[in-house]
Structure formats: structure tokens, C-alpha cells
Amino acid sequence: LAKCVQLYETYQVRHGIMLVGPTGSGKTAICETLAGALSELGTKHVIWKMNPKAITAPQMFGRMDSSTGDWTEGVFAVLWRRAAKEKKNFTWIILDGPVDAIWIENLNTVLDDNKVLTLANGDRVQMSGTMKAMFEPENLNNASPATVSRAGIIYVSDSELGWNPLVNSWLDTRRPQEAALLRPFFVTYIDALIRTMKLECKPVMNGIPWEHVSRDFCSITSLLTLLNAVLLDAVRTSEIFSEGHYERLFIYCCCWSMGSMLPLVDRPKFNAKMVELCNGNTPDWVDPERDTFFEYFVNEENTEWNTWVD
């Protein structure tokens, strides 16, 4: 909510706005929430979104054929012209993707006081008062000081949102009785496992580009995807499992989502924390000194732990 207020304050004084933050930090949700709120208060606010890195610069702004002199309009140029002609609605053109010097420098005249998009064929499209140019990059490493100084910058940290809204939204889509049984497991396990992974473990995939991604958001998303899969048959048959069965399935999914990027040397540390949290809901270890939850799965027939070799 605080970031929505910051975006609104910046929206009032700037025509070019950059929401900077890692993937999964909630940048898109902030824009959509503010646009929806402003639409409820009066004039409708429409969001047009594109990924500038999905196409080349000529495809984005336009291309002049050197042999015939024909001009082919680019995707962004078409959106810009349409938004400039739109009078009934407020239009936000959002460029959702990494900032690259190849295309961002072409927007300097848009972001400064001229508010004009200059194209290679000589056309100059004036920005209307109902338009906003917005950007959702993960960082500004490739943006020049000239570009950064022209836009309003709002940084959204991955700690602003956290994993709770994501889980709560997912639980709202589940059956009430099932959600009531699953909710305590998220409270018990998630923060403790995240803390263990950050302090004691070293995931295989680390460093660039992963420091620009909300790792917690991505791992929880994977956890929810796995839970959807293992609970699919129960939903189809309208079956409600026991609390112990749900916990075993939850532990299994945690291992192969949150713990999936851990090397073999770190799995025992992750496993030790799981054993500490699960209150005895563990397999009958074949080799107590070496076995971990990663060597077991939940048997659908007897709902108990079985080793993969079985």
C-alpha cells in the first residue's frame, strides 16, 4: 500500500515513471491496483503493456527501407500514436522488461520536458496529457544518467511483499477444509526453511542473474505448483486427507521446490531443519545417518513414506 501511495505521488508530478525491483516483488500488482483505484474514482485508466526486449529496436520504433524509402511502423510507435489520440481514457504504456541502452536512449525526448516521440522517418508524436510512460525493469545497470534523471524512480524491494500474499491468494482458491489444514504448515515451515537456506546453505544457482530475482517468491511459486499437482486427484474425487497425510505431502513438495537447488552436501542441513519442524512425521529411516527426506516419497496407496528404491 505504501508503494501504491508513492507511485500515486510520483504519478501526479511525472510523466515518465520507473518501478525498479526484482522479479516477484509486486511491481505489476502495484500498477494494476493504482490504475483500478483511480478508475473507480473517475476516468478509466487503461494499461497497455509490452516487453521491449522481445523484439528488436527497428521492430519496436519502426524501420525505414533504404531501397524503397517505405516506412514500417514499430509496435511501440503504434501504441504511442493510439494513446496520443485516446481522449476518453487515461492510458499507461508500460515497458515491462530489462532496460537496455539500445532502446531506452530513443525515449530521452519522451521523458524530458518535450514529451515527444521522435521516429526515424522524421515524425514527431506529441505526448497527450492523458498518457504516462512507465517502466518495470529489475535494475538500471544499463541506463545512462541522462535517462535516469528524466524519470521518477520508485524502488520496490523483494522484502516489501514477501511470500504471505502469494500463499493467501492460493489458499483462497482451495476448498475451505483443505485450506484450514494446509495453512499452519506454511506458518511452521516456510520462514524457518528460508532462514536455514540463507544462513547455512549455498544453492547451486547463485549470483548473476539470480540476485535480481526474488528467490523466495520463485521457490514458493514452485511449492504451490507441486502442491496443485499432488492434490489434483483429491480435488477431483472431493476427498479430504488426514492432517498427517497433508503434512507428508507438504514436506515432499518443500524438498523438491525450496530444496531443489541445494547441492548434496547441503541437503542434510535442510533435512535436519525439516526433521526438527515436523514433530515426528518422518519416514522409518533405512539408514538414519545418511537418509534424508529426498530419498523418500509419499505412497498414494497407504499414504505413508516409501523409499524411491521400493
Image (cartoon, helix red, strand yellow):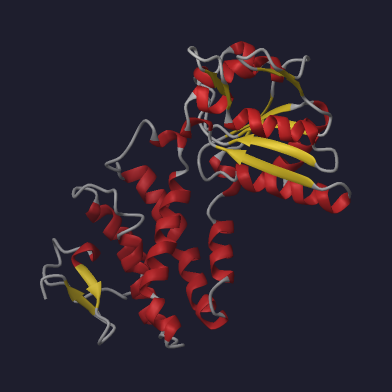
Q: Quadrant of residue 287?
A: bottom left
User: Residue 151 appears at what percent x and percent y?
Assistant: 69, 22
Please report the residue visible at 54 percent of the width from the left and 83 percent of the height from the top.
177
Position of 273 with respect to 157 (left or right) is: left
* Residue 154 shows in this picture: no
Please report the residue visible at 69 percent of the width from the left and 48 percent of the height from the top.
32
Please report the residue visible at 68 percent of the width from the left and 35 percent of the height from the top.
93
Does residue 61 lie above or below 68 as drawn?
below
**280 and 9: which is toward the camera:** 9
Position of 52 with respect to 300 (left or right) is: right
User: Residue 271 appears at what percent x and percent y?
Assistant: 27, 59
Does residue 182 lie above or below 76 as drawn?
below
**108 and 243: which is toward the camera:** 108
Position of 277 with respect to 21 (left or right) is: left
**294 and 151: which is toward the camera:** 151
Position of 87 with respect to 163 (left or right) is: right
* Residue 271 shows in this picture: yes
User: Residue 274 appears at what percent x and percent y?
Assistant: 33, 63
Please report the residue visible at 86 percent of the width from the left and 46 percent of the height from the top.
43
Please, which residue is most extreme toward the front here?
Answer: 68
> Quarter holding the C terminus?
bottom left
Total numbered circles: 0
User: Residue 111 appears at what percent x and percent y?
Assistant: 70, 19
